[in-house]
Amino acid sequence: TSNSWAYRTLDGGNLWTGISTGLPTNQVAFAEITIDPKDHLNVFAGFSGYANGLKVYNSTDAGTTWTNISGSLPNLPVNCILLEESSLNGIYVGMDVGVYYKNDTLADWIPYFDDLPNVIVNDLQIIKDRNLIRAATFGRGVWEAPTISNPLISSVEKPLLRIDHAFSVYPNPSSGPLKLKLAKAKLSSRKVVRIMDIHGVQLHEQVLDLERMEMDMPELKSGTYFIQLEMNGEVQTTKWTKF
């Protein structure tokens, strides 16, 4: 057993209070405690060890109560937790193998480590001005990829599409073909759709001019891709998974 404990102070260190009630501290050891920079009451705790389903916990009251948000995370040690300052409230978790991601729109964690070696991820960092996430690994150096929120597109270089130009891809995930639907768009608008891999390399480009669109699918291996729509000088990107 671990018997590890966590404490908090709200007065600069004069008084400390235990906040381990509701956490599996008798089974696994703390690996990381991460505090939301936008809300100091929002705290995440990650755990090492091999206790299935006891990986990540969240507290919205600075540790007074905790909720298990481990979901379907694999039974591997958690090494680091990184919060992304975005409207989606994204969370990245680095484990002994791979990186996993969750946000307000996802019911469970999804893998986010295509082309990353199967090695321990010790630390994660986001490069805000480049929309990149970097992973420091044990024995295989540092790796980077676009972040899930607003990937590949710099808000300084190109604005995101307005809400009336929003689009979606379906089915998602899918083995193809890939269909796109625009929420509201002028049928006369010229639309360029591109498929990118997670490193930002363009794999396919197609011009479409209908409200409901079906793309020609190139030969793509299973994995995570980004679908980019350019219309009227504006660009939006969304994530798509092929199985």
Image (spheres, grey):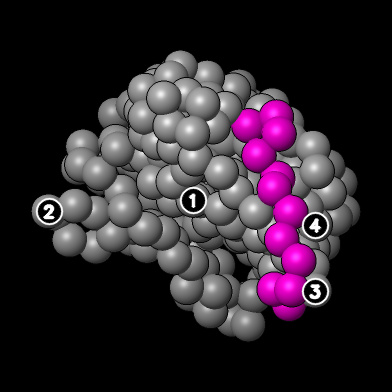
Percent across and percent down for residue 137 are 24, 54
Q: CA distance from mark 2 to mark 1?
A: 21 Å
Q: Which residue is mark 1?
A: 32
Say what secondary structure mark 3 lies in.
Answer: loop
Q: Nearer the viewer, residue 45 or 91?
A: 45
Q: Which residue is mark 4?
A: 41
Q: CA distance from mark 2 to mark 3?
A: 40 Å
Say what secondary structure mark 4 lies in.
Answer: strand
State yes or no: discs 2 and 3 in contact (Cβ < 8 Å): no
Asked if 96 appears above or below 185 in the picture, the reply is above
Q: Residue at x 56, y 43 (%)?
A: 5
Near mark 4 (Cα within 10 A), the count class, few <14, some 14-19 or many ≥20, is some
Q: What range is drawn magenta here?
A: 12-23
Say what secondary structure mark 1 lies in.
Answer: strand
Tell me which amino acid carries mark 4: Leu
Q: Residue at x 44, y 51 (%)?
A: 80
Q: Which residue is mark 3?
A: 11
Quadrant position of residue 70: top right
